[in-house]
Amino acid sequence: MRTTLTLDDDVAAQLTDLTHRLRRPFKAVVNDTLRRGLGHPKPGPRKPFKVEPLDLGELRPGFDPNRFNQLVDELEDEAILQRMRRDAAKTRG
């Protein structure tokens, strides 16, 4: 169920701190905290998520797997530049 909830500043700060300490999503921390406060037991542990690797076979000629990080960096840089140009055009226009 989706709902809007207004939290007092001190409660929000404690939940945010707990979120960072537990390294869990805010939603999960709020739900677990409410369950404990309402006297309901914490749900049992979930089955661990397992990644199944997929063999993609040979790479196409010209692709160097040791340079994929560089490619990602270049694509990310280009996306940032495009965003900056678009924002600058909005400001001028």
Image (cartoon, rainbow, N blue to C red):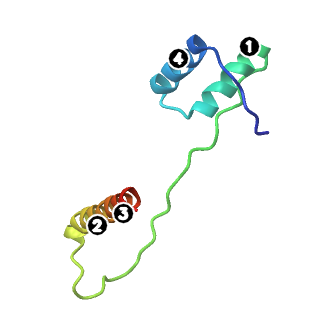
Q: Name which residue type carries label 4.
A: Ala
Relative to 64, 60 lies left or right: right
Comes first in the chain, label 1 or label 2? 1
Q: Which of marks 1 and 2 is in front?
A: 2
Q: In this view, does 38 lie above or below 93?
A: above
Q: Which of 76 and 39 is in front in this view?
A: 76
Mark 2 element type: helix
Q: In this view, does 76 lie above or below 13?
A: below
Q: Name which residue type carries label 2.
A: Glu
At 40% from the left and 78% from the top, the residue drawn is: 56
Comes first in the chain, label 2 or label 3? 2
Q: Give the residue number, with chain letter if any, for mark 1.
A: 37
Q: Name which residue type carries label 1.
A: Gly
Q: Name which residue type carries label 3.
A: Ala
Q: Nearer the viewer, mark 1 or mark 3?
A: 3
Q: Nearer the viewer, residue 79 or 22?
A: 79
Comes first in the chain, label 3 or label 4? 4
Q: Give the residue number, with chain letter if any, for mark 3.
A: 89
Q: Give the residue number, with chain letter if any, for mark 4.
A: 13
Mark 3 element type: helix
Q: Give the residue number, with chain letter if any, for mark 2.
A: 78
Assign the C terminus to one quadrant of the image. bottom left
Assign the N terminus to one quadrant of the image. top right
C-alpha separation, residue under disc 1 versus residue under disc 3: 51 Å
C-alpha separation, residue under disc 3 versus residue under disc 4: 38 Å
C-alpha separation, residue under disc 2 versus residue under disc 4: 37 Å
